[in-house]
Image: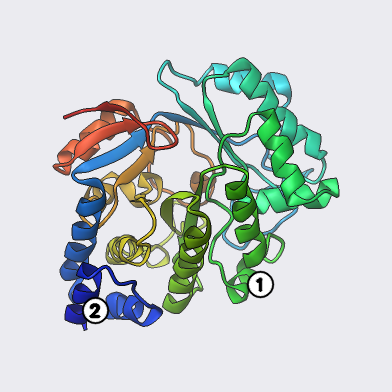
């Protein structure tokens, strides 16, 4: 079966769901890796990208109660917060570096504040840091804003763009099937709602990101359906820059190994993402979730990006991420060079800032 898949890939033919299942079930993981590496090298050569960015979570108050989330809080719960303008600016001022190129902003679906709060977050940051790209609000958040503001998602996106929004992150996708969402994230955007938000964003000129949160109740078929749904939208819009498989984190750092995804599953999923998503330029290995060593290995399993410095990641660490919450540019370079790849510092849109040959 792998021989047939290899021939299809080399002939430029698109893989099917059945092909994806065969790749998941193949005992020869290294052959799957070799195929993904071959495809990635044709697209990106030996270059592996990273960005110096700052992660910002303006609020953790959330009306949704997703089964996998340890970040959210009810409005009156201990630990609940919603940053004021002064708190937001102080947070950024005390963490920003000379090389920061991107603000990565996501938060809770906070129904206790109006849409203007989210709009002002963008405009305040753009006013104070006009040269930094603002990557903010997931497709699920866009649908939530439309709901609380009584406006269409397109109107919401146009207002955010006018305020300074440059791109959408890929979160809120989880697994794009309704069976999964009914069980794991019933209060958030539907499959069609998430896809609609990104379709509209692409139509308005934004390039965006797509994630997949794997490792809980989803079947292998559902992972592949998810990949095929974003692949189909990419055929339509060509608006996605990168696909990011995210390993599910358990509720606490002390959780048993049996409650974490295996290294083999992580590497296989990255490789299969590269093979299934023939129309995506990049597959990202998210070092926060799989750790630096597996991230290095992932660059030989089809990944051409390892994300960024982050400075203070909260969402994965609110559940069970075992990694540090931030990393330096030098450590990212070291990680890539240690994998015998060429580090490339990029901006949000994969324009090369510096190649560390």
Residue 327 shows up from this direction: yes
Residue under label 1: 182
> SS for tag 1?
helix
Q: Residues within 10 Å of mark 1 (few under 14, many from 20)?
A: few
| Image height of 10 relative to 311, above or below | below
Give the position of the N terminus as an image quadrant: bottom left
Mark number, residue 26: 2
Residue drawn at 65 percent across, 18 percent down: 127
Residue drawn at 49 percent across, 20 percent down: 96
Position of residue 90 measured from the top left corner of the image (x, y, whole percent)? 62, 18
Position of residue 285 measured from the top left corner of the image (x, y, whole percent)? 34, 50
Q: Residues within 10 Å of mark 2 (few under 14, many from 20)?
A: some
Residue 67 left/right relative to 97? right
- Give the mark, 1 or 2, whose residue is nearer the N terminus: 2
Position of residue 71 measured from the top left corner of the image (x, y, whole percent)? 60, 47
Q: Quadrant of residue 195?
A: bottom right
Residue drawn at 24 percent across, 75 percent down: 8
Give the position of the C terminus as an image quadrant: top left
Q: Nearer the viewer, residue 342 or 110?
A: 342
| Image height of 347 relative to 294, above or below | above
Residue 42 left/right relative to 78? left
Q: CA distance from mark 1 to mark 2?
A: 30 Å
Contact (Cβ within 8 Å) of mark 1 with mark 2: no
Residue drawn at 42 percent across, 15 percent down: 98
> SS for tag 2?
loop
């Amino acid at each position: 079966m792998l021989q047939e898949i290899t021939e299809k890939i080399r002939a430029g033919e698109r893989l099917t769901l059945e092909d994806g299942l065969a790749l998941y079930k193949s005992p020869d993981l290294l052959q799957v890796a070799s195929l993904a590496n071959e495809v990635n090298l044709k697209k990106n050569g030996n270059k592996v990208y990273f960005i110096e960015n700052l992660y910002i979570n303006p609020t953790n108050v959330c009306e949704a109660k997703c089964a996998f989330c340890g970040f959210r809080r009810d409005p009156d719960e201990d630990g609940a917060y919603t940053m004021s303008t002064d708190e937001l600016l102080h947070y950024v001022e005390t963490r920003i570096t000379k090389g920061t190129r991107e603000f990565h902003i996501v938060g809770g679906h906070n129904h206790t504040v109006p849409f203007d709060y989210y709009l002002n977050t963008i405009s305040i940051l753009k006013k104070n840091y006009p040269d930094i790209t603002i990557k903010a609000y997931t497709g699920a958040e866009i649908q939530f804003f439309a709901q609380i503001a009584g406006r269409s998602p397109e109107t919401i996106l146009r207002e955010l763009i006018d305020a300074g929004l440059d791109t959408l992150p890929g979160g809120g996708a989880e697994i794009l099937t309704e069976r999964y969402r009914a069980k794991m994230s019933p209060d958030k955007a539907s499959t069609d709602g998430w896809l609609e938000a990104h379709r509209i964003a692409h139509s308005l000129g934004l390039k965006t990101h797509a994630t997949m949160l794997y490792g809980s109740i989803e079947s292998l078929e559902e992972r592949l359906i998810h990949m095929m749904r974003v692949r189909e939208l990419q055929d339509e819009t060509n608006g996605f820059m990168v696909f990011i498989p995210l390993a599910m984190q358990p509720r606490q750092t002390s959780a048993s190994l049996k409650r974490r995804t295996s290294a083999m599953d992580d590497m296989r999923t990255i490789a299969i993402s590269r093979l299934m998503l023939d129309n995506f330029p990049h597959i990202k290995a998210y070092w926060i979730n799989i750790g630096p060593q597996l991230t290095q290995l992932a660059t030989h399993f089809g990944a051409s990006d390892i994300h960024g410095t982050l400075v203070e990641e909260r969402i994965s660490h609110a559940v069970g991420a075992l990694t540090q919450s931030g990393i330096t540019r030098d450590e990212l370079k070291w990680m890539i060079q240690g994998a015998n790849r060429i580090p490339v510092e990029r901006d949000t849109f994969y324009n090369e800032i510096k190649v560390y040959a």
